[in-house]
Image (spheres, rainbow, N blue to C red):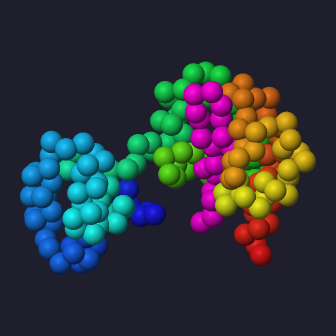
Amino acid sequence: MATNPDRASFFPAIEKKHGLPMSYWHDQMKLIKDLKYPEQIAFLRENHGFSQAHANALVLYSKGNTTSKRFNTIDDYLKPHDATKQKTVKAIFKAIKTKYPKMEIVIAWNQPMLKLGEDYIFGVNVLKNHILIAPHDGEAILLKFAKRLEPYEVLKKTVRVPVDWKVDVKLLQDLAAARISALKK
């Protein structure tokens, strides 16, 4: 994943890989501007050998979407959500930060994450009918906590909790501790 959210940050790699200046690719996009997103992606991939990431960057840039970054702060992220969801997410982060005050809340992958130094520890994603929580790179961690997670729907790398979840502080702190411990190995 590119760390720079600016879609134009892909342009030097596109020019290098395909040997043509971006002016050529912008002209190509003008020729297919009336096609839908999937058709434009297919055009670049099938006719020009673009990767999905490069095609996505060029197509979205051509449509005026020049950055993948949608949120700058947790408040930006939470703004479209109702008070119940906001309260639950804030309680989730508070539970972990109480034990680990050096963690900071950042936005990564357009969702709030807890980060300790350079390492991502824990993330939250608010959806319509539930909230997903996850220790970063947590598939093994979730298996380790399978018994304690039985009341919830556990997916491959995330756990679904209700939007009005009565936050299990000890569980959240233990999940964060397991992630930190895994980083030390």
- Which residue is nearer to you in this view: 98 or 35? 35
Residue ranking furthest to the front: 46
- Splitting the image into 4 quarters, where does residue 152 fall? top right
Range of residues picked out in magenta? 113-134
Residue 23 part of the magenta segment: no
Residue ranking furthest to the top: 83
Q: At 59% across and 35% down in the image, what residue appears?
A: 126
Establish if 151 lies above or below 156.
above
- Where does residue 55 sit, x and y in percent of width and height? 29, 59
Establish if 116 lies above or below 74.
below
Q: At 29% across and 63% down in the image, what residue appears?
A: 45
Residue 123 part of the magenta segment: yes
Q: At 46% across and 63% down in the image, what residue appears?
A: 1
Most prominent secondary structure in the magenta stretch? strand
Query: Which quarter of the rendering shows the C terminus?
Result: bottom right
Q: Is residue 174 left or right of residue 118?
A: right
Q: At 54% across and 45% down in the image, what residue appears?
A: 111
- Which residue is nearer to you in this view: 41 or 92? 41
- Where does residue 37 sit, x and y in percent of width and height? 28, 45
Q: Is residue 161 left or right of residue 44?
A: right
- Where does residue 50 sit, x and y in percent of width and height? 29, 66
Residue ranking furthest to the right: 147
